Each structure stands twice: as C-alpha cells, then as structure tokens.
Image (cartoon, rainbow, N blue to C red):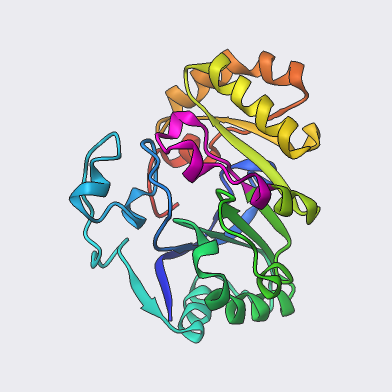
Amino acid sequence: MLKISQIFGPTVQGEGSAAGRHCVFIRTFDCNLECTWCDTAYTWAVTDEKAAKTLSGHRYERNDPAYGEKLMEPDEVINRLRKCWDVENEPTIIVVSGGDPLIQQRELVPVLERLHAWGNKIHVETAGTIPLVPEFDACVTQYNLSPKLANSGNRLSKRYKQKVLSALNATGKAWFKFVITKDIETDLAEVDQIVADIGVPRRRVMVMPEGSDARTNIETAQQMVDAALERGYGLSFRTHVLLWNDDPDR
C-alpha cells in the first residue's frame, strides 16, 4: 500500500528546471525532515510536536479527506491519475513529490514502471537524504533535488547526507534546487559549499526564493538574482505561487 496525500492535475510544474511544463502530481504522505517554512506540512505535521517545528504551528489531521494520508494500491493510484489526464495515451510529466517520495521507493515502483512504459517522464522531488533503490532509479527521468539549508530548521546531520547526494548527482539525472530566504548571502554561501563538496555542475544548480505569496517571491528573487548569476546558477520562481498563490490543489 502507498501512503498518498494528493493526486492532482493537469497543472504546471512550479519549480526548478521544468518550471512551466504540463504535468500531473502524485504527492506522497510522510517526510523524514521538518522544515520550518514547508508549504506541504500537511503531509507530515500531524502531531503537536511536529507542528511546533513549523512557522505556523498548525497541526494537520492525518485522516483529513483532502490532504491527509490515504492508503492506496498501485492500481488505485493509476486510476486516479487517469481521471486527471490520459496518462496512457497522452504522456506527460508525472511529478512525484511529498513529503519525500524516496521513503516509499519500493512501493512506488509498480506505479512508475507502468507510467514509464506508457512514455511518461517521471520527475522525482526529494531532499536527497535517502539512498536510492536501483529498480526505482530505473524508472526516473529526472531528480529535482532540494538539499535543505540551515534556514530549514533541520539539524545538519539530519538534512545533509553527502554520500546520498553524490550518488544522486552521479546518476546524471539530477538538478539541484535550493530555497533562499531573505538572508541571501548566508544562504548562498552554504549553497556554494554544498555545490563544491558534491561536485555539482553549476549549470544544474537553481536557486529559488522562499515564500508562499507572489510579492515575497518576486522581492526576494530581485534581491538575489545578480549574486546567483555571478555564480553561474539559474533562478527558479515558484510559478504555481505566482499563478495561484498557496492553493495546494494547483
């Protein structure tokens, strides 16, 4: 059984190198990190202790019918996707997000194998703290890696796994995306160190402003874009926020 929060689309990929492209989302439930600014905290902040780690302090209900945990068989996931888009006959990008989907790699394989066989591109979003399973990796077209910085509120030993990131980088399928807050120079210095430690090609690094509203995204992006470009990094807006604010169904 798979632990699923949402299956929705069609929409556009909001972040990273594929921003703006047509896609359908599988959002898994559960995460091994607790980012203070997380915009999908409903996939993990279901206890008072975990809720206290977020900026809002809001505790979500695990059994919430809209965004809570739903136990689903692979066929159920496929059928739900088909209601969103004709994934068998009109292939698109399937974004597998979370939470962190690498927690459920083995359970996801039967779903991803069918989607891949139909010609869909599989983009997996992960923080890069969980080692890959080979049969899962065989289905993946692209990894959208988002290693967490100190600004996430997670301790270093929990959020930064150099060997895991190096292995993901070595697949040749990884794009790196870092969330930058208004403490721009501090955050970019940390990005620089990770990029150097992992040996990430700078052309595969994108930085993205933190924020759940369009104004914050634009203002932070304007303040950091020149410093990012000088380093050879790309800039990712949070396209879905610019279009739909913080609507979790888009």
> In which quadrant of the rendered view does residue 51 lie?
top left
How many numbered discs? 0
Horizontal arrangement in the rendering, residue 78 relative to residue 194 (left or right):
left
Any magenta on residue 153?
Answer: yes
Which one is in front, 22 or 149? 149
Above/below status of 186 relative to 118:
above
Q: Residue furthest left?
A: 48
Above/below status of 160 relative to 216:
below
Horizontal arrangement in the rendering, residue 50 relative to residue 246 (left or right):
left
> In which quadrant of the rendered view does residue 167 lie?
bottom right
Above/below status of 168 relative to 24:
above
Q: Residue furthest front?
A: 157
> In which quadrant of the rendered view does residue 71 lie?
bottom left
Tell me where residue 205 appears, x and y as whole percent: 71, 35
What segment is highlighted magenta in the picture?
145-165
Tell me where residue 222 appears, x and y as whole percent: 58, 16
Which one is in front, 161 or 77? 161
